[in-house]
Image: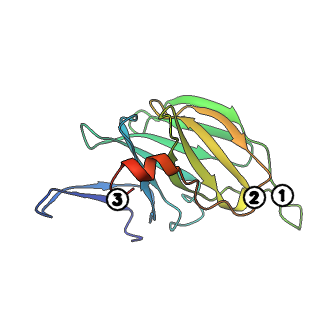
Amino acid sequence: MNLGQVTIWDDNFDVIRQIPIGGGGLFIGTSEHTPFLWADNVLGGSDVWNQVHLINKQTLELDRIITVGTTKGTVTDPVTHKVLYSWDVPTVKDDKGNAVTPRILHAEPANHGHWTMISEWNAGRIGIYEAETGKFVKYITGLTTPTFTYSIEHRQTIPGA
């Protein structure tokens, strides 16, 4: 952990790819309904803990980066740096009135497969994203340190999920 990369290995535990990401991650999520591995950077520094990297499962290349800022969220192409999607982010403030940069982690697919949920630890909400594109859908707010968004059906049908 905290190496700033995702390591892919085969059934013999031979490393077949090491994919650089922004910072140290803790969770990777995926399902059969998304073309991506969703890798957080929650153990990285404050400059990257608000990002989730989407790795294309076919090419094993970094495909998109979701970034949640204090007022705006983006899905960006990591090669061209073109913003593919953007949305307004409700600003969360700490006890001193300072805007909080969301610390996002643990991408979890929804039961129906259309969405992937990402917890925003210090913002008290869960972001919902389209599983096939990474495009933002909506927030579930009013939560206290949401760390996991367990999908019971997903965990019953996918070994190791």
Q: Viewed as shown, does residue 124 lie left or right of 131?
A: right
Residues at badges 2 and 3 in contact (C-beta under 8 Å)?
no
Q: Residue at x 45, y 60 (%)?
A: 27
Pinpoint residue 85: horizontal percent, then vertical percent: 57, 29
Question: Which quadrant holds the C terminus?
Answer: bottom left
Which amino acid, by three-letter code, is at mark 2? Val
Q: Residue at x 66, y 59 (%)?
A: 146
Badge 2 is on which residue?
100
Question: Which quadrant holds the N terminus?
Answer: bottom left
Q: Earlier in the sequence, mark 2 or mark 3?
A: 2
Pinpoint residue 138: horizontal percent, then vertical percent: 68, 35
Pinpoint residue 121: horizontal percent, then vertical percent: 66, 61
Q: Residues within 10 Å of mark 2 (few under 14, many from 20)?
A: some
Q: Is residue 122 above or below residue 35?
A: below
Secondary structure found at label 2: loop
The CA distance from mark 2 to mark 3 is 33 Å
Residues at badges 2 and 1 in contact (C-beta under 8 Å)?
yes
Badge 3 is on which residue?
160
Q: Quadrant of residue 102?
A: bottom right
Residue furthest to the bottom: 1
Between 143 and 6, the one nearer to me in the picture: 143
Secondary structure found at label 3: loop
Q: Residue at x 15, y 64 (%)?
A: 13
Q: Is residue 80 above or below residue 152?
A: above
Between 139 and 69, the one nearer to me in the picture: 139
Q: Viewed as shown, does residue 137 lie left or right of 15?
A: right
Which amino acid, by three-letter code, is at mark 3? Gly
The CA distance from mark 1 to mark 3 is 37 Å
Q: Which mark is residue 93?
A: 1
Secondary structure found at label 1: loop
